[in-house]
Structure formats: C-alpha cells, structure tokens
Image (spheres, helix red, strand yellow):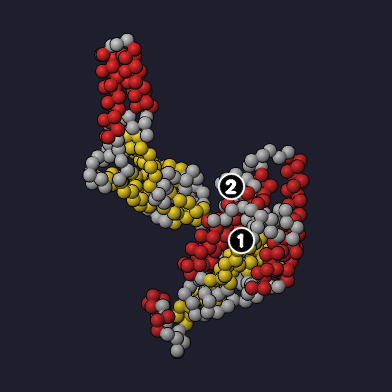
Amino acid sequence: MWTRKAAFTFTGGIALLLIGMMISNHQLMILGLCFMGFIAINSWLSGHGDVEVKRMLSADNLYKGDDLYVELEITNKALRRTQQLEIFDNIPHEMKLRSGLNSMRVNLGPGETTRIRYVLRCPLRGHFSLGPVSLRFHNSFNLFSDEMYVDHHSDIIIFPQIKDVEEAFVRSRTPKMYTGATTLRTPGPGTEFYSLREYVPGDPFKNINWKAFARTGELMVNEKCRDAVTDVYIILDSRDISRIGTVLKNPLEMGTVAAASIASFFLKRRDSVSLTIYDNKLSYLQPDTGDKQYFKILSSLAGVTPKGEMPLQAVTNSIGPRFSRGSPVFIITSAEGDGTVPHAVRDLVGRGHEVNILSPSSIDFERLVSRIPRMSYEVLSLERANRMSGLAGFGAQVIDWMPDMELSQALLTARGY
C-alpha cells in the first residue's frame, strides 16, 4: 500500500515529466523520471509478513482486580530484513494498561527475535480474548506499507473477587454423611480440635496429648469436632434490573462476589455446594465438592450478564424438589420488580430449609448514577424496609446489603427484621 509520501513523490514526478515535455526542458523530464524510478525501485524493497508470533500469559485464570503479565515474542522467519515493522497487540477495552506498552517499532534481521512485555489491569470479571496481533511493514524510505493480522488469540477468564467469610452463620439442621465435611460443635471423629479429656482404656495412642501429659503427669486425649456434611444451595438473581448502578458497583457485581465467596467458604469446609443463576433462563449446577466444583462455579459467575425477567417462584418451583431436606439456601437478589419473592421464600421455609436472603439495595445503587429527591428516596427506602420485614416474617434471615458495605460486615449484621 502506498503511503502519502509515495503518492506525492510519484505525482510530482509525473508533473515534472509533463511540464518538461510541454516546455521542452530535458532537465525537468529527467528529474521527473528519477522520481518515478525511485518509487519503482523502492516498491521492491517493501517489507514482508513472514513473521511468527507467540504470546505468553502469566495465568489463564485471574481474579477481578489482579494484574495480567503478557509477553509477546516476534520472530522473523524470512531470509531478509523486515525493514520497519510496527507491532500492535490488540487488548480488550475492559482491560487497562498498567505498565509497559503493547506496541513496538523494530527492524528484524533474518532469524532475529524481539519481545514486548506489558502488564494489564483486570477491573472487570468475564471471559476475554487477547488478539489478534496487528503488523504494519514500512520500507526504508517510508514510501510503501503493508498491513496484516496474525490471528493469534489468547483466552482468559476473570473470576469474581473472593472475600473472606470468617464464620458461617448457618448450618443445616440435617447434615448428611459421606459427601463432604462441615464441622459440628460436638465431639466425635474429625480434624478440628474440640477439647481435652482424660485417657480411658481403648483410646488410640495417636490421640494422646503428650504435652499435656508432660505438664500434668496424667494422660490426656485430644477430642475432635465431629465432621458432618450438608448441601448448600446458592441462588443468584441476574435479571435485567440487576444492572442498576455503575459498571463496577451494581447488584449483579456484588451478587457474584457474594456467591463466589460463600461457595468458596463452604467448599473449603468440604461441603457440597450448588449454584443456580436465573435471568431469561435457568442455569443449575448440581451440588458437588472439591476444586473442580469451585472452578465450575467461578466460571459460571464470570460469564453472568444482566438480562431477562424470570420470577423467583418459577425458579424454586423448578429446582426446589431437588433440594436436600433441611439444607440451607442462600438467595442473592435485590427483590425488586418481582412480586413472587415472598411466595418463593414462604415455600422454601415451609419445606424446612434455612433461607438466607442477601439483598443488595438497588435504591442506593441508583443514587450512584442519578439524583433521587430526598422525599422519594425516603419513601422508596421505607417500601424496601417493609418488603424485607415481610420476608423476615416468613422465617428467612434477611441481610440488607448497602453499596459501601463489605461482605463480611454485611454477614455479621445478619438479623431478622
């Protein structure tokens, strides 16, 4: 492709040739022919696209807010120089360049390799792809250029942030055996220390606390907390109304953080966790344990987008019969624009479940992007408080989650209205 410089030079050569012919000036004609010949010779010296590109990432999976280290390796596979080569690595607009540059100008000889290193900030969760790599070749005099793309993509998943949940505020009334482990505050076989007691014949020697024996002269045995297990069900509201607020602060973003943190907490305790996401359709992940289930949940949460208007009662009617009897259910919803929430909560409580509602306040999120008159805000807040009180009246534990409140702080304020 001709550059503007080449076009002006060639046009000037033609103009000089024509003017020289018109006024019979051989010097102008020769000068015009030299310009045109210079362009013709330079067209043979243009760059070429025989390069190999490799991209290395510091990780394929990251958490929201982490940094991604990228290294791009470019190798000239041809037998001649690339001339002036511009390299540009396309990155998603959701990611921010933290340090370094994702572009470079080089002139690579045969077999030579260069590297571009830069760091990206990942402020948003989701599924992203880096690439393709844009290449632009220029000849020595910048008269001709050639553009091409190397169709090399690197996929990456940005998981929601995991917040610390120091202590669970709910346990199942009917723990199940052999599917995981949740610590119960009663003595029995387990891993967590419970208390000391005197040794009795028949106790395993491995349970003897020798430090206590050295201190007291009496054989003492370590008692452990009995391990049992339960299924934990998490229901996340990702309807279109959950987009209210800013890009970084809205009910859906806070909901994904809460779902990921609660799932991580119970999975670390070797409980069995299930995730349900509802928007314009229903997505249900069977309860399971272990790291595999952990990454399944995080991958599902990374791709959640607000859409649809599915009511909560349709969700509970569909998957409620699959819930284990007496198991805890976490419902993460703003409870706005859905009149079926009280009926769904009443049905779950009636089936013997411990229902915990973590409700991001959509009214306060709306204040982040628009001005709400004080009187209107007070009326809406009162209506919301009445709605939360009504849900608590069915036996659910309700948490009204404000935008500026950390998850651990919100869980500690768990109370019945």
Residue located at (25% from left, 45% from top): 78
Visible residue check, residue 155: yes
Q: Classify 10 Å Cα crowding around label 2: few (below 14), some (14-19), many (20 and above).
A: some
Residue pointed to by mark 2: 249
Q: Classify 10 Å Cα crowding around label 1: few (below 14), some (14-19), many (20 and above).
A: many
Location of residue 308 in the rendering, given as x and y in whole percent from the top left corner: 66, 55
Location of residue 277 in the rendering, given as x and y in whole percent from the top left corner: 61, 61
The CA distance from mark 2 to mark 1 is 19 Å
- Going by the numbered disc 2, the residue's amino acid type is Lys
Say above or below: 360 vs 114. below
Outermost residue to the bottom:
201
Location of residue 156 in the rendering, given as x and y in whole percent from the top left corner: 45, 54
Residue pointed to by mark 1: 277
Contact flag, marks 2 and 1 (Cβ < 8 Å): no
- Going by the numbered disc 1, the residue's amino acid type is Ile
**From the viewer's perspective, is the residue at label 2 or at label 1 nearer?**
1
Residue located at (45% from left, 89% from top): 202
Q: Nearer the viewer, residue 172 or 254?
A: 254
Residue 332 is left or right of residue 103, and the answer is right
Visible residue check, residue 100: no
Residue 405 is left or right of residue 66, and the answer is right
Residue located at (26% from left, 13% from top): 26
Residue located at (29% from left, 35% from top): 46
If the image is split into quadrants, where does the C terminus sit? Answer: bottom right
Say above or below: 250 vs 170. above
Q: Nearer the viewer, residue 57 or 381?
A: 57
Q: Nearer the viewer, residue 191 or 213?
A: 191
